[in-house]
Image (cartoon, coloured by chain):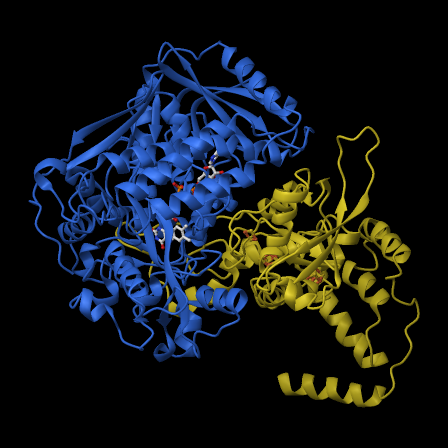
Chain colours: A yellow, B blue
Amino acid sequence: MQANLKVKRYNPDEPQPRVRYQEYSLDVLESFTVLDALIQVRDEVDGTLALRCSCRASICGSCGMRVNGRAKLACKTRIAELAPNGEQLTIEPMGNHPVIKDLVVDIDTFFNQIRRVDPFIQPDSTPTQGEFIASSESMTNLLGVMNCIMCGACVSDCTVLEVDDKFIGPAALAKAYRFVDDPRDDRSSERLKKLNDEHGGIWDCTRCFQCVEVCPKDVAPMDRIMEMRDMAIEAGNRNTPGYRHTESFIRSVRRHGRLDETRLAVDSIGWTNVPGLLREAPVAMKAFTKGKLPPLFPHKAEGNSAIREIVEKAEGGSK
Amino acid sequence: MYEHDLLIIGAGLAGLRAAVEGVRGGADVAVVTKVHPVRSHSNAAQGGINAPLTDRGDDWESHALDTIKGSDYLADQDAVEIMSREAGEAVIELEHMGVIFSRDDEGRLGTRRFGGQKVARTFFVGAITGSALLHVLYEQAIKYGLRVYEEWFVTSLIEEDGVVRGAVALDLRTGELHTIRAKAVIIAAGGAGRVFEPSTNAIICTGDGLALAWRAGAPMMDMEMVQYHPTTLARTGILMSEAARGEGAYLLNKQGDRFMETYAPEYLELASRDVVSRSEQTEINEGRGIDGNVLLDLRHLGRSFIEERLGYLQEVAVEFLGMDLANDPVPIRPGMHYIMGGIKTDVNGRTEAPGLYAAGECANVSVHGANRLGANSLLDTVVFGRRAARHALEYIKSVNGTSRDESQLEADKARLQALLDRPQGIRSAALRREMAEAMTEGIGVFRDQASMERAETAVRRARDQFANVSVQDKGKTFNMDLMFALELDYVIDCAEAICAGALARKESRGAHYRTDITQRDDENWLKHTLVYKTDEGLRVDTSPVAITKWEPVKRVY
Ligand SMILES: Cc1cc2nc3c(=O)[nH]c(=O)nc-3n(C[C@H](O)[C@H](O)[C@H](O)COP(=O)(O)OP(=O)(O)OC[C@H]3O[C@@H](n4cnc5c(N)ncnc54)[C@H](O)[C@@H]3O)c2cc1C
Ligand code: SF4
Ligand code: SF4
Ligand code: FES
């Protein structure tokens, strides 16, 4: 079958480096992945094309890139599925990572985010003999996050990282969960407190769902972040952006039948916290220029009273 | 110019385990790796890691005997004894570092069965054991603030008066060559699967470490011992872990028969890998295969069991074959997977080149002999990675200062420039593929004098043609084309040693099965083959096998 690729190129070694798109047409097998096709280009057509790859089996995490605008593992993306009739596939480097050359991006930022969560187990003591005893369920539960291969796809498409480079990001937060929820770790509450208080922590995710959708390993970072929010509140982190956020959320839904995101942001930071509010200003500006700022005065949602009733019922039920 | 006490080449399990030991020992340690540590090929290991835990009623002698029997009595028994005795501690230590090993109902480490062993002693994390181990060791590297030269490609070792004193490496990001001086060097640069095509190995497994040590005068040992894994997917060679059979999967031929009943009545699908691969190939050759494959059948295990214990295998089947293990048997066949051979070391990782150590897949201690048991390789990396670092820590105490010589750097600059200056020529990818296909054809599951000679001829041609390889990319930044050419040079070195070892061994043993000499010959060949690279060409030698407790007997599964 025929594969038509349009690849974003960039070479910093050129006297005047510039971004350009290059098209390749290839004869490929039905079973070919995007990576197989790119390797064919590199090996047979154009030896200057730079990309990272190694395992070809979706386990090493090297080959993250954007295919038709979404972050994917090239070795796990079959051409026949996306372009059965030779439709053009646009291949670009991942987002939210500086580009070094062609499809090769700088992964330093990604791993610095990982470092921010103290990504190693911290038990107070280890058994003098044998292993830690831990339930099978607790370990199986962690298997989901251990599946993360650090490919960067979630970071590439995270909408918060696009506007706020202080955000720890989905992969690192999923990594944090791996320790917070590990029964062998004795720093869970410190970890939660830090993730709760810190700018860029668990409360800065907007639940846009991108990381869940693009993750090739079903790690579902957003779900882990939400679990950690619950854990943080349960652990008594009340007078924090997070808790206020939730409070304001409920207030907003009760009052307007919908989410007042402007008020939510300000409530979360605290009305009297001027430095905190100022710190958010650049984020708001960036969001504004990208058309992502919510309206200043919320409109009431239709069926408002019904929503209020639901909220009241839910609150009543939980009391 | 950079300088450290201990330089480790490779950030897979062997390299990182050695590094952690070095840092804990208080030395100034650095790791240089051509890919980010978590991209190392160790992450591909699926099935698990063996350890005979005494509190589970197992004992080191039984693991040692299984290993030695699996090796067809070519493993050095003193080395195997060390590995089996230290295994339990090594696995518990990994658990303490944070590995989320699967558990039993009491919350203790759970096991699965693996080939060539009667006891279930393989510890595992779903079907992502290697990845889970590698990521945890990388966490430890972060914890200790380990210095890592990431995406630096080693082009040469530095030798002074016959002693290894560091390495020269290409920073792929900038295209600059640098000298990294050190009092001792541990090579932990992984395997050489790319000598063959297809292979379960990653694109980065180009035998760099083997070739680097070889060029420094250390011999490669038993390189003819190439493992063909019984269950790989056609075309890509992607692996379906032995864990599938360990958990109860069947192998079926065209008629739907469990053909292993004929070849290994006791162990069935869990006989040692060389035995199962030969059985499959016999079925295929005698017309009982399906398009060159046999079938791996997991249907009777049930969907939920498959998804929990073998999730990654299901993912591979769905993604790469469009098949569902709970509904379909999948076509598989023997595929090149591992080289038991490697740089000869003693039980402390020392090579014959002073100042140079080796550990992991590139080394040959030898614990795998003529056939490696599944899940013994991860064990090998952590046990001998740690031992090599411990010994190196002692050794560096006796070394005064580091080298000041820059001649190797200058030589490498000239070598790379010559490659870049060659205006037109052969592409390295095409040359590698041609040679690697000939290697698979000539040094396969079955081999004979003529087939091995054909492989050798192809390798010689590749060596000659290498002089005409050119790179299209003339730039500095991430010049992968240049790196592939340098890797091909290493690949050809390894292929030369494999052919020399294979042609030397005039018997059938383990993975080295000759259809023209089908018997094992303990009288003449209970020996290791050694291949040296010298200025006059290759030199083949032999050395005795260490036999301590277990006299060689005929292998029956
Ligand atoms: C698909 C598959 C499944 C497997 N499953 C199992 C299993 O279940 N159980 C088991 O015990 N074994 C298994 N094995 C074998 C086992 O995974 C490997 O033998 C082992 O992980 C090798 O580890 P290593 O540290 O020696 O090398 P690797 O993990 O391969 O690391 C090599 C390192 O060297 C670096 N390097 C190489 N060349 C250079 C250079 N020129 N310059 C700088 N750095 C360099 C690389 O960047 C890398 O960091 C499996 C192997 C494969 C292929
Ligand atoms: S859900 Fe949260 S973490 Fe995930 S991509 Fe969206 S903002 Fe980022
Ligand atoms: S969470 Fe998923 S997408 Fe993100 S780095 Fe890990 S594997 Fe990749
Ligand atoms: S090449 Fe390893 S994940 Fe794609």
* B515 left or right of A9 in image: left
Residue at the far front in the pictured view: B450
In the rendered view, would you say B103 is above or below B38?
below
Report the front residue among A183 and B170: B170
Which residue appears at 70% of the width and 66% of the height? A83
* Residue A101 percent location from the top left of the image: 71, 39
* Residue A289 percent location from the top left of the image: 90, 55
Report the front residue among B158 and B202: B202
* Residue A247 percent location from the top left of the image: 74, 71
Asked which quadrant contains residue B463, the reply is top left
Question: Does the rendering let one see residue B204?
Answer: no
Please state the quadrant of the image where ligand 2 appears: bottom right
Question: Does the rendering let one see residue B306?
Answer: yes
In the rendered view, would you say B115 is above or below B8?
below
* Residue B552 percent location from the top left of the image: 9, 46
Report the front residue among B526 and B254: B254
Asked which quadrant contains residue B347, the reply is top left
* A251 left or right of A194 in image: right
Q: How many marks?
A: 0
- Viewport quadrant of the C terminus of chain B: bottom left
* B114 left or right of A270 in image: left
Which residue appears at 34% of the width and 27% of the height? B357
- Viewport quadrant of the N terminus of chain B: top right
Which residue appears at 82% of the width and 44% of the height? A20
Report the front residue among A316 and A295: A295
